[in-house]
């Protein structure tokens, strides 16, 4: 089913007789706002705001930095560094290390904690010919991990990518039920992200590592699929599983993710024409029933430049562990970054 931006609107019963001119003006006003919104807005009480951005010249367009105090990306670098050092010491006190080799498995984690909050030491040349930082995890960077903007489907987390693609029909069916309620005005469980233009709505199954139980109950098969993923990043603040919806005309401006610990996976559910995802100035396009894999700690942005009648761009976003992180490091990182 192709979701467009039209939906029914029922007038409430008028108990007081008003003048015809007032009714006409009211009617046109309501219809104008329905046309502009293209559907109900999600609750704004828990918005992730990209308004009032701090700006950085990247050679392409204005850079947006999230200014939401509840976002893990935006916490104070200094306090994070201090908390990490103490928490790592506490964690190491709780584990039993039998020999020197086992103790060394946490060496790069110790080094990374010491460097937490530092600014990148170098800048890379972007493809537009001007200088900008392309790779900049804003909260934490684990030393020694390989990185690049884009990954092929068979390159990392292959089994989990296949499982997501093979369960596309089930995921899509459960989403459509939730989204139909949303279009009828039931915004329960939805959040609205503020963007410079357009509308960006999200429905979390996992939000910053925590399971959103009420939302998972509405998508039970999808939730079970997530539990089967061997590399799904749960129980850590950097892990999410989210339905994300961009209406026509929406631009998510350039920004960085918080860490280099994850590979972000986008399963295309509904992809209209003229939709694109750009990472480190390299642009790709989503495909329905297929996954795109990228490192979101690189500078990235997303656009839906299609028409309203083409409907919204809809993807299922899942964060997967970087394949080079060991099980011992995962356990420690969960301890450090659990909200």
Image: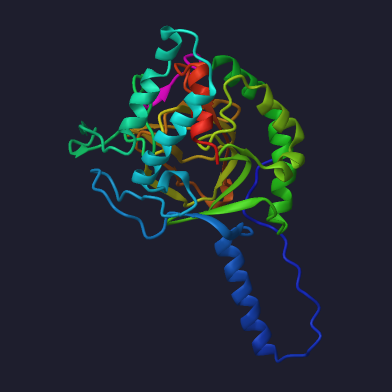
Say which quarter of the image contains residue 166. top right
Total count of labels: 0
Seen from the viewer's position, the closer of residues 306 and 216 is 216
| Left or right, 107 with reference to 181 | left
Residue 145 showing in the rendered view: no
Residue occupying image coordinates x 28% and y 37%: 118
Q: Which quarter of the figure is the C terminus placed in?
A: top right
Say which quarter of the image contains residue 17. bottom right
Residue at the far left: name it: 130
Q: Which is the main secondary structure of the residues drawn in magenta? A: loop
Tell me, what colour scheme is on the image?
A: rainbow
Seen from the viewer's position, the closer of residues 70 and 86 is 86
Q: Which quarter of the figure is the N terminus placed in?
A: top right
| Left or right, 151 with reference to 2 | left
Q: Is 132 rendered above or below residue 18? A: above
Q: Position of residue 41 (x, y in %)?
A: 60, 59
Q: Is 95 rendered above or below residue 177? A: above
Say which quarter of the image contains residue 84. top left
Q: Position of residue 337 (x, y in %)?
A: 50, 36
Q: Which residues are magenta?
A: 148-156
Residue occupying image coordinates x 46% and y 41%: 274
Seen from the viewer's position, the closer of residues 90 and 200 is 90
Q: Position of residue 72 (x, y in %)?
A: 46, 44
Residue 268 showing in the rendered view: yes
Residue occupying image coordinates x 25% and y 34%: 120
Q: Is residue 267 magenta?
A: no
Q: Is 322 rendered above or below residue 245? A: above
Q: Position of residue 329 (x, y in %)?
A: 48, 21
Q: Is residue 152 magenta?
A: yes
């Amino acid at each position: 089913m192709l979701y467009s931006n039209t939906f029914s609107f029922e007038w409430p019963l008028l108990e007081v007789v008003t003048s015809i001119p007032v009714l006409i003006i009211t009617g046109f006003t309501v219809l104008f706002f329905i046309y502009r919104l293209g559907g109900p807005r999600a609750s704004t009480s828990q918005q992730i705001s990209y308004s009032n951005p701090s700006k950085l010249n990247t050679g392409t367009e204005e850079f947006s930095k999230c200014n939401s105090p509840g976002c893990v990306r935006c916490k104070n670098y200094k306090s994070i560094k201090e908390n990490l050092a103490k928490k790592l010491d506490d964690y190491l006190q709780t584990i039993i290390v039998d020999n020197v080799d086992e103790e060394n498995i946490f060496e790069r984690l110790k080094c990374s904690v010491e460097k937490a909050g530092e600014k990148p030491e170098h800048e890379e040349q972007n493809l537009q010919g001007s200088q900008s930082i392309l790779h900049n995890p804003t909260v934490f960077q684990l030393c020694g991990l390989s990185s690049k903007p884009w990954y092929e489907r068979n390159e990392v987390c292959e089994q989990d990518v296949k499982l997501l693609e093979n369960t596309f029909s089930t995921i899509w069916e459960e989403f459509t039920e939730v989204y139909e309620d949303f279009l009828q005005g039931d915004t329960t469980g939805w959040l609205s992200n503020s963007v410079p233009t357009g509308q960006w709505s999200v429905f979390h199954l996992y939000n910053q590592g925590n399971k959103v139980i009420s939302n998972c109950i509405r998508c039970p098969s999808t939730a079970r699929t997530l539990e089967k993923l061997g590399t799904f990043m749960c129980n850590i603040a950097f892990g999410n599983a989210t339905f994300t919806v961009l209406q026509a005309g929406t631009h998510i401006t350039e920004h960085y993710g918080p860490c280099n610990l994850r590979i972000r996976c986008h399963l295309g559910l509904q992809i209209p024409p003229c939709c694109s995802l750009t990472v480190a100035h390299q642009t790709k396009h989503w495909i329905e029933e297929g996954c795109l894999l990228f490192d979101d700690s690189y500078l990235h942005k997303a656009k839906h430049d299609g028409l309203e009648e083409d409907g919204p761009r809809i993807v299922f976003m899942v964060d997967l562990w970087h394949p080079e992180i060991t099980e011992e490091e995962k356990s420690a990182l969960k301890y450090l970054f659990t909200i």
